[in-house]
Image: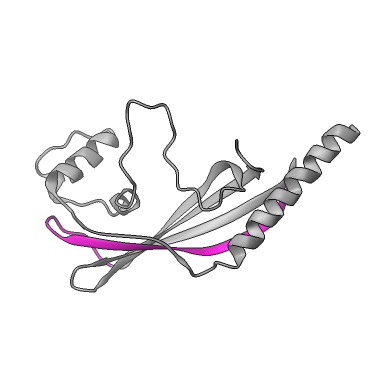
């Protein structure tokens, strides 16, 4: 490895390490909350259609629990070629999806109103094949208007670079 690329790798390592250290101090902090959002037939029908299944009336009575992962997302501007994302720290760059895990406590129903809260649950640095990786896990917890817990979604994001400009 040349001295120049070694210096670049070290700069990225410092940026990732500093960004993750700042996030580690925020573990447990609420970073977003939203709701109530009503689970309606149109949203369920569009979700089934996005999965490649036509929104037949009988299917729209069945609320797929994976729909929870989409409820907190902000609207996407379809006129801009920009990937929607939630950036938790501006010092971390080059994010990739590290996986999503669902924990389901009960079924969802048409007409139900759902609330959510997103908190930072983990932030650490791990060495990858091509350098340091910043691993960040956010958990969104969901509950109904009556206060009953519906479930949670854990999203892992892997950061492979430093500051995006």
Q: Which residues are magenta?
A: 106-128
Q: Where does residue 13 sit, x and y in percent of width and height? A: 75, 48
Judged left or right of residue 1, residue 54 is left
Q: Residue at x 17, y 51 (%)?
A: 62
Judged left or right of residue 18, residue 122 is left
Q: Where does residue 90 sit, x and y in percent of width and height? A: 57, 48
Q: Residue at x 32, y 29 (%)?
A: 78
6 falls in the magenta region: no
Question: Looking at the rendering, in which quadrant would you find the C terminus?
Answer: top right
Is 55 above or below relative to 71? above
- Whether residue 3 can be seen here: yes
Judged left or right of residue 94, residue 42 is left
The answer to which quarter of the image holds residue 115 is bottom left
Q: Where does residue 9 sit, x and y in percent of width and height? A: 78, 41
Magenta stretch: dominant SS? strand
Is 46 above or below relative to 69? above
111 falls in the magenta region: yes
Q: Residue at x 62, y 61 (%)?
A: 22
Q: Where does residue 132 sit, x and y in percent of width and height? A: 72, 48
Colouring convention used in this rendered image of the protein? one colour
Question: Looking at the rendering, in which quadrant would you find the N terminus?
Answer: top right
Judged left or right of residue 37, residue 139 is right
């Amino acid at each position: 490895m040349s001295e120049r690329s070694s210096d670049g790798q070290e700069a990225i390592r410092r940026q990732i390490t500093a960004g993750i250290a700042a996030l580690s101090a925020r573990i447990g902090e609420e970073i977003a909350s939203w709701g109530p959002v009503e689970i309606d037939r149109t949203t369920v029908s569009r979700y089934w259609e996005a999965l490649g299944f036509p929104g037949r009336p009988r299917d729209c009575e069945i609320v797929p629990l994976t729909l929870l992962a989409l409820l907190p997302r902000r609207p996407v501007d379809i006129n801009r070629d920009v990937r929607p994302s939630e950036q938790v720290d501006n010092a971390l760059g080059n994010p990739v999806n590290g996986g999503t895990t669902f924990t389901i406590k009960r079924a969802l129903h048409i007409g139900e109103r759902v609330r959510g809260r997103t908190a930072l649950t983990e932030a650490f640095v791990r060495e990858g094949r091509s350098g340091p990786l910043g691993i960040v896990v956010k958990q969104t917890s969901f509950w109904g208007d009556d206060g009953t817990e519906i479930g949670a979604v854990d999203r892992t994001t892997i950061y492979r670079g430093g500051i995006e400009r």
